[in-house]
């Protein structure tokens, strides 16, 4: 999770302009993601983002801003689709429900998540709201890349492309 002007008590790294990158292990906070992001945006008055790294294969990313709204995308989209398919989480009306879904429930990735162009546009709006100087081409590139070798690197590449730069190695 990354937010501005909050000095967390947990492991974190400091980035420029007061941005803090918090690192959490496990899935404990995942169910509270949207509530925590909303609270961060409300408390700081600045946009925030959350990236959940799944097996170092892809990042489940949510960006939230008061004016730019919410965007939910995957970094490493092909790996995300493979993962969701393996667990029966994607499909269409003709597919049987996966283990975590009720009968008739499924996730259609094309309907649920923005395409690369839309995701880039929304991410740039988020960066603009945050007062960042984003590199549009670099943001677009990150949204189409796969982890090589780690999805954590995609997250760091996105932060850099958005204009959030690390200031000290903590």
Image: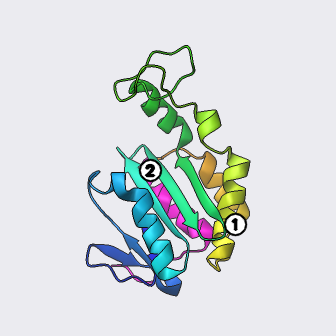
Q: Is residue 112 magenta?
A: no
Sort mark 2 into few (<14), some (14-19) or many (20+) by Cα contacts within 10 Å: many
Rendered position, 49 above or below 109? below
Sort mark 1 into few (<14), some (14-19) or many (20+) by Cα contacts within 10 Å: some
Rendered position, 99 above or below 53? above
Q: Which mark is residue 87?
A: none
Q: Nearer the viewer, residue 168 or 69?
A: 69
Number of marks drawn: 2
The mark closer to the camera, 1 or 2, is 1
Image coords of residue 2 (percent x, y): 45, 70
Q: Which mark is residue 151?
A: 2
Q: Nearer the viewer, residue 48 or 55?
A: 48
* Residue in the image at 71% along x and 50% along y: 118
* Residue in the image at 49% along x and 76% along y: 42
Q: Nearer the viewer, residue 44 or 114?
A: 44
Q: Earlier in the sequence, mark 1 or mark 2?
A: 1
Element assignment for label 1: helix
Observer able to see residue 56: yes
Rendered position, 105 above or below 59? above
As measured in the structure, the alpha-carbon distance from the residue carrying label 1 to the one carrying label 2 is 23 Å
- The span shown in magenta is 149-170
Q: Which mark is residue 125?
A: 1
* Residue in the image at 50% along x and 54% along y: 61
Element assignment for label 2: helix
Image coords of residue 123 (percent x, y): 64, 61
Quadrant housing the N terminus: bottom left
Image coords of residue 101 (percent x, y): 40, 27
* Residue in the image at 42% along x and 43% along y: 57
């Amino acid at each position: 999770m990354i937010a501005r002007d909050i000095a967390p008590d947990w492991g974190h790294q400091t980035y420029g302009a007061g941005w803090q990158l918090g690192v959490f292990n496990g899935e404990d906070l995942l169910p509270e993601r949207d509530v925590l992001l909303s609270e961060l945006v409300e408390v700081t008055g600045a946009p925030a983002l959350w990236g959940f790294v799944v097996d170092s294969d892809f990042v489940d990313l949510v960006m939230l801003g008061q004016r730019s709204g919410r965007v939910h995308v995957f970094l490493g989209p092909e790996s995300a689709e493979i993962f969701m398919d393996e667990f029966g989480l994607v499909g269409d009306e003709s597919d049987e429900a996966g283990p975590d879904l009720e009968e008739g429930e499924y996730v259609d990735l094309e309907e649920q998540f923005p395409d690369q162009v839309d995701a880039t546009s929304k991410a740039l709006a988020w960066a603009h709201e945050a007062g960042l100087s984003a590199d549009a081409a670099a943001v677009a590139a990150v949204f189409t890349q796969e982890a090589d070798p780690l999805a954590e690197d995609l997250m760091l590449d996105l932060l850099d492309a958005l204009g959030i730069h690390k200031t000290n190695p903590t």
